[in-house]
Amino acid sequence: MNVEVSVSPLAGLPAPVGAHELAWSYLLDAVMADAHRRGLGALRVSVPEASLKADMHLRAALSRRERQAAEGPGVGAALLGSERVLPADATRLYSLEFGLLASGALRRVRTETRGWRLEEHLSVYCLSARLWGGPIRAAALLGRTDLGDRAMFGMRRAFASKHRHPAFYHLCIWGRA
Amino acid sequence: MNEPARLAQALVNLDAWLETMRQEGGYGGPVAHWWQNRYRYTGPGLDWRYEGVLIGYVTLRQKTYAPRWCARLRCAAEDLLAGQGADGSYRASSFEMNPRSLGTPHEAAATLGLLSALPYLEDKRQALEAAKRNLDNLIAKLWDGRGFNDRPGVSGRVPNKLATLAQALMTYAVVSGDDHYLPYARAALEDVLRYQVTGGRFDGAVHQYAPGAGRGDGRFFPFYAARCVPPLVLASTIFLEPRYRAAAERILGFIRRSMSPDGSWPQIVYGGGQQADWPRWLAGSADILLAYGTLGEELPAAALERLLGSQLPSGGFPTAQGFSSQISQRAPVGPPDYRDVTPVVGWNDKVLRLLAELLEAGTQLPEAKVGEVTASVTVCGKRAALYENNYHMSICPEHGDVLYAWGKDKPWAQTVGVGVEVR
C-alpha cells in the first residue's frame, strides 16, 4: 500500500497529549487497520499536525510486507485535518468529525459524504470517560492513589465505542454507495 | 513427570509457541498490560520481548549446543537491526502503547538482549554499532543533565526503567571494553537507590514514578522492583560497591513479604497501606522469580508451580489472573477475562529466560508437544471463548458476532469488537 501523508492544521484542536494522545492512537490505528484489511493499493491521509504525520508513517511502514498478496486498486482517503476535499479516485473514505465535547468551530468541520455509505463508526474520548475525571481528581485530593488508579481504568473502559455516543471525536468509515 | 523433565518440556513447548508468533519483521501479537492494552496492532514489537528472547536463546545455546538456538537468536537480532531507524531507535518499541518508538525501558531492554547475544552473531561489529546508536539516541533524548527522564522534555524518573537502562549501559562496557557510558549508568542507578524505601513497613520497595524528579509516588510494584535486582547485582561487580547488592537484597525482602501464600504477588502495594491485588501476573512472574535466582536464593516453590502449572496447550503462558477486577479490585469470580488468558510475547520472553536459566546444562531436550487452545473467557463480563492455534487467534461470544480475529502473520487484527479494544 502506498501511503501519502500531508498536514492540514485544524485551528483549536488540542495537542495530541494525554487523553488526546490516547484518542489519536485509536483513530490512526482504526484507519490503518481497515485500509490494510481491505487491501487498498493507496491511502492518502491528511492529519492536523506534524507529530501525527510521523505516527501515520510509522504505521504505514509496519504494515508494509515484502511477501504479500497483490493489493487491490482501491484508494483510501483519510480526511482527519482541515483538508476536506475528496480525491476523485477514492473508493474508501475515513472522515473525522467532532462531537459534543469539542469546540463549536471544530464541530463545524464537515465532509461531503453524498454517494457514500456509512459502514463503521468509532466514538473516541467519550463523555462517559470524561466524567471519570471527577472521581480521579477527588481521589487525588484525598491522597488516595489507589482509588485514582481504579477510576483511571474506569475512564479507559469508557473511552471509545462503536456506537454514536457524545464524544470529542467521531471517526466514520465509508464505502462507495 | 519429574521436575527437570517437566521444565525441559515446558521450555520446548514455549519455544514452539514463540515460533508461531513470528511474522515478517519479528515477534508480534496482541498486548495486555496493567497500563494499557493493544489488540488491534499485532505487528512486531521491537521492545522488551527481545530482552528475554535473546538472553533466553543465548542461555539455551550455552547449555545445550543445539544449532537451532543459534538460529533463533540470530533471527531475533536481525529483527532489531532491520527495524532500527536512522536515529538509532527501534520501530514500534513501546509494547502496550505500540505502534510508537522510543519505548522505555523497552529499547534499552532490547539493546541489552542484543548485547548479550553478541558472541553468537556473525557480524559482531554491526550489532555493537547498532547497540551504540540506540544507547546514544536514548541518552540524547532522555538525559536532562542530571538523570534520565521517561519522555523527552518531561521531567520524571521511573526507577525500574532506569535500572534496565543502566544494565544495558553497563553490559555495553563489558562486551566492548569501552566504559564511556558508565557515568550515565551510575547516575541512573543512583536514582534507583534514591527512590528505594529505607526502613519501615515498605523497606526495600522502590517507588514506581517520581514526577518532576521529585518525591516518589508511593506506588510499589513487586514486579517492577524485581526488575531492579539484576541490574543492581551487576552494578555491584562493575563498580565494586557492595551497597548496590545490598539494595538488591532489600528489594528481595520486600518481594518476599508481599508474596501471597499461593505464590502470586499483588500488582501494587500502596504507601497508604492499600493494595491493587488484581491483576496478578502469571507469565511476568518469571522476572520476579529471576530476582531470587540472581541473588542465589531458592525460588519459592508455590510461585514456580503456579507459573509452570499455567502453561497453555499451545506452549504459551497466559498473562495474568484478575484483569476483570482491575477496577473493582474484588476477587474475580467465574471465567477469566480475555486479557488474562491471552498469551503475550512480551511476557512470555521472561518465562523463556527463566526456564533457560533453570535448565541443567547438557539436558537432552524432548520434542515439543503442543496443541490448540480453547478457553472460556469473559469480555466486559459477557461469556465468550478464546481460540488459538498456530495460525490464528479469535474470541467468539456465546451469541453474536466474532469479537476478535487475528491471523498470526498479520500486523493488524481483522476484527476488533466492542470490549476487546479497551486500551
Image (spheres, helix red, strand yellow):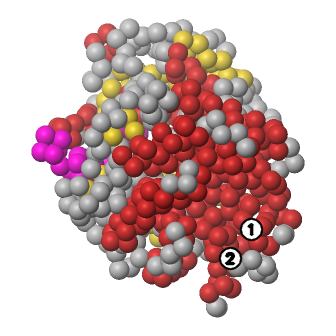
Q: Is residue A153 magenta?
A: yes
Residue placed most toward the observer, A113 or B67: B67
As displayed, is residue B330 above or below residue B303? above
Number of numbered callouts drawn: 2
Is A48 left, or right, of A129 in this rendering?
right
Q: x, y percentage for residue A96?
A: 45, 22
Q: Amino acid at mark 1?
A: Leu
Residue placed most toward the observer, B41 or B111: B111
Crowding at mark 2 (Cα within 10 Å: few <14, some 14-19, many 20+): some
Co-location on one chain, circles 2 and 1: yes
As drawn, the label of residue B250 is none
Report whether residue A109 is seen.
yes
Is B224 left, or right, of B327 in this rendering?
right
Classify the position of the C terminus of chain B by image quarter.
Answer: top left
Is A60 left, or right, of B265 in this rendering?
right
Q: Residues at badges 2 and 1 in contact (C-beta under 8 Å)? A: yes
What segment carries the magenta color?
A139-163
Q: Where on the picture, by quarter, is residue B69? A: bottom right
* Mark 2 or 1, nearer chain start: 1
Please give the residue where the numbered disc 1 appears in the rendered image: B60
